[in-house]
Image: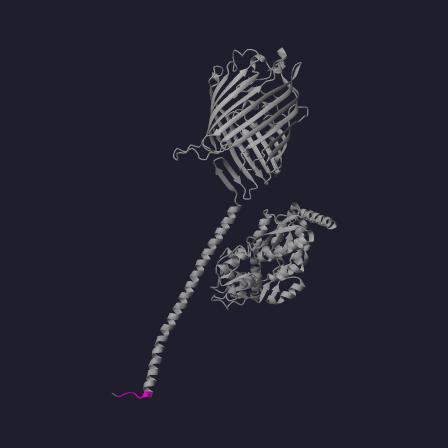
Amino acid sequence: MRTLPAAVRTALATTITAVGLTATLPAQTASTNDLDALREQIRLLDQKLRILERNQELRQETAAADAKKQPKLNVGDGRVEVVSADGANSLRLRGLVQGDARLYLDDANAAQDGFVLRRARLIFEGKFSDIFQYTIQPEFGGTVQILDANINAAFKPGFQVRVGRFKTPIGLEQLQSDPVAFFNERSVVTNLTPNRDVGIQVHGDVLTNRLNYAVGVFNGVLDGGNSPTTNLNNEGDFTVAARLFATPWANDKESKLKGLGFGIAAGTGNYKAGVPLNPYRTDGQQNFFAYRSAVGSTTVADGTATTISPQAYFYSGPLGILAEYVSSSAELTNGANSRKLTNTGFNLSVGYVLTGEESSYKGVTPNTNFSLNKGTWGAFEVVTRVAQVDIDDDAFAGGGTSLAAAGTNATEVTTYGVGLNWYLSKAIRANFDIFSNKFDFQGARPATGALSDNELAFISRIQVSF
Amino acid sequence: MKFKSLFTLLAAVAITGSALAKDIELLNVSYDPTRELYVEYNAAFAKYWKAKTGDNVVIKQSHGGSGKQARSVIDGLKADVVTLALANDVSALNKVANLIPANWQERLPLGSAPYTSTIVFLVRKSSPFAGKVKDWNDLAQPGIAVITPNPKTSGGAQWNYLAAWEYGRRNYGSDEKAQEFVANIYKNVPVLDSGARGATTTFVQRQIGDVFISWENEAFLAVKEFGADKFEIVVPSVSILAQPTVSVVDKVVKKKGTEEVAKAYLEYLYSDEAQDIIGKNYYRPTSEAAKAKYAASFPKVELFTIDEAFGGWTKAAATHFADGGTFDQIYLKK
C-alpha cells in the first residue's frame, strides 16, 4: 500500500481539519446567536414581568392612599354614620321608636288600657372642625316638637361650651338617655327635676375624668317641664343650674369602686306667671298631682324656685344601682294665697343583668344578638325600684284658693316597680314592667277618677334605638 | 455650709431651668429624596436650638412627591415648614390657600433656595445599553427603558422633563421638535412613580429599566449603597440647575405658636454646619466654604436655570404641567 509523503499527509490533515473546522463554525455561531437571542428574550420578559408587578404595586398604593381620603360610611347595629377621612367632620343619624302596651290591673284605670307610640325620634348628631358637635332631635311621638337643638364646642375635655336647647344638668335619671334607663318610664322623682331648657352651659371632665362639672344659665323651667324655645315671663331673670359628679376610682380598673359615682346638683331662678306648672305623673303616666288651673283660680309661679339633688350610682359587673334625692321648692300664688312649697322625693333603682353583661349608666350591650338560627338570646336584665314623691302639705292650705285641690290630688305617692329587660341586640330592647303606685291623701281618697284606687300597671315596650 | 448653700442654689437654678424648657414639635413637609439630609440636619438643628434657647425641639418629617406634598399642606396638613423640590410647589401654598405671603421667596437668601442640585443619568451596568448612554438623545432611542417619575406629582420629574425639553430645543431647533423629542423619551418610560424616591425604588430595587433620570444626590446614594459595579453615573452635556426652595408656613406657625423656631430652622440651613451637611448628602451647597470643600464631589456640567430657559416656574408650569399642557399632550396620547 502506497502511502502519501509525510508533508502531503500533514498538509492534507491540516486542510481536512481546517475544512472540518470551517464546516462546524457556522453551526457554533448559530447556536451562540440563538443563546444570546434567548438571553435577550428572557431579559425582556423578565423586565415586562417586573414592570407589570411594579405598576400593579403602584396602583394598589394609589388606591390605598385614595381610600384614606374618602369619607367613611359606618353602618352597624346602633349607628349610621358618615365621617370625613380625617375624622374632623361627621354626621350620625340615630333614631328612637318606642311602642308601648299599657294594661292597668286596678279598677280606676282600666279604661286607659291601650297601645301608645311613646316616642318616635330622629336624631341628627355630628361634628365639624373636630371641635363643634351638634345635636338636633325632633320628637314625632305625641306632640311634634324639637326636643334638642344645640351646639357643643369641645375646646378641651375639661372645657366645653354648649348652647341651645338641652337637658338641664340636675336630675341623675333625667340626664340618662331614655332608651338605657332601667325601666320604660323614669321614676316619679323626675317630676321634681327640670327637663329641657334653652341656655348656655360650660361643662367638662377634669381630674383625668374623675370629676364632671356643669354650670349653665337658662331661661328657666319648673318641675318636670320642658322650656319652650322662646323666653318666658321671668322679667329678665335667668335660672342658674350647676352639677358636680365625681367618679374617683373610674380610672382604676382593679378597684371595686371604679363604677361608683356621686354628686350634687342644684338650680335656682326667679319665676313669674306664664311659666308652666306641670302636673306630676305616676309610673303609669296618670296625673296624681296638679296645681289649680281653673279660670279665676289659677296657681302661678311668683318668686324664687330652687331644686337640690344629691345623687349617686354604682355599677359593678352585671349589677347597677341608681339613687337620687330631690328637693324642689317654689314660691307660688293663687290670688291672695302666696306660699313657698317644698316637694321632695327619692328614687332607688337596682338592675342585674342575668346573662352577665356589664351594667352601666349608658346601658347594657348584649354579648350576643337574639337569633333562633344561632341559638342565641341576647341579654336579660331584672330591675326593681322604689320611689316616692311627697307634696308639701301647704299646697292644700287656703281653702278655695289653695295652690292645689286636696280632694283630687295625692299628697304622697310611693311606687314599687319590677321588670324584665330583654336586649335582643344593642338596638332592640323589650321591657316588661309592673308598677304599683300607692297614694296618700290629706282627706278621703277620691271616689272617682284615676286616684280612686292605687295604680297597678303592666307596661310592656318594644324599643328600637340606634 | 457655704458649699451646701451654693449647691442648693445651683440645683434650684438647674431645676428651674429645666422646668422652663419648652418641648416644641415642628413638621417639615419635604419632597421625596431629602429623607437622609433632614435626618442629619434635624439633629444638628435641635442641638443648636437647645444650646441657644434651652428648648427641646423635635422635627417630624413627611416625604413624598413634591406636588403631592404641596397639595397635602393645602388640604390641611399642618406643616410648620415646607422644603419642596421647586418654587412653584411652594408658591401654590400662597396662590391656592393663602398660607404664605406672595413674597415668600424674598424672605431668605438666594431666593429661599439654601441648596441646589441637578439632573443626571444613572445607568444599569448589566443593561445592554450600558456604555451607550451619553446624553439626552440616547434616552429617545427605541428599546431603551427609561425610569422617571410623574411630573404631575413629582418636582424632580418636572426638572427632568424641562432639562430634556431644553436639550431638545437646543439640538433640534424648536419647541415643536423638543416636544417630539421628549415624547419619544416618554414612549420609553414603562413605570411612572409619583415621586423621586419611588422611582429610585423602581430602578434600583425592583431592577426595572436601563437608565434612570435622577436627582444628582439620589444617583450618588444609589452608587454608594449598591456599588459602582452595578450602576454608573452619566452626566449629560447640559442639565438644569434645580433650586429646591423652603418656606415657613405662616398661617400654621402663627396658630401653633412655632413661628420663631420655624424661621430659625430654615435660616440655619444657610449656616456653615448645615451647608456642610448638605454637601455631605450630595446636594450642592450654596456657601462658598462648602462649595470649595465639596467641589470635587460634583461633576462639571453646563447648567441652565429655569428663568433663562423657560421664563420662570409660573410660565413653565402653565405651559408644561397644567392640565392640557405639553405633558398631558404627550403622555395621554401614549
Say which quarter of the image contains residue A39. bottom left
Rendered view: A214 above or below B131: above
Which of B172/A108 is in front?
A108
- The N terminus of chain A: image quadrant: bottom left
Which of A218/A146 is in front?
A218
Q: x, y percentage for residue A65? A: 52, 49
Say which quarter of the image contains residue A375. top left
Q: Is residue B178 visible?
A: no
Which of B59/A221 is in front?
B59
Which of A137/A431 is in front?
A431
Q: x, y percentage for residue B251? A: 65, 47
Magenta highlight on residue A5: yes
Rendered view: A242 above or below A10: above
Q: Residue furthest front?
A: B1
Q: x, y percentage for residue B303? A: 61, 64
Say which quarter of the image contains residue B297. bottom right
Q: Main secondary structure of the magenta part?
A: loop
Magenta highlight on residue B222: no
Which segment is the magenta one? Answer: A2-6
Q: x, y percentage for residue A212? A: 60, 33
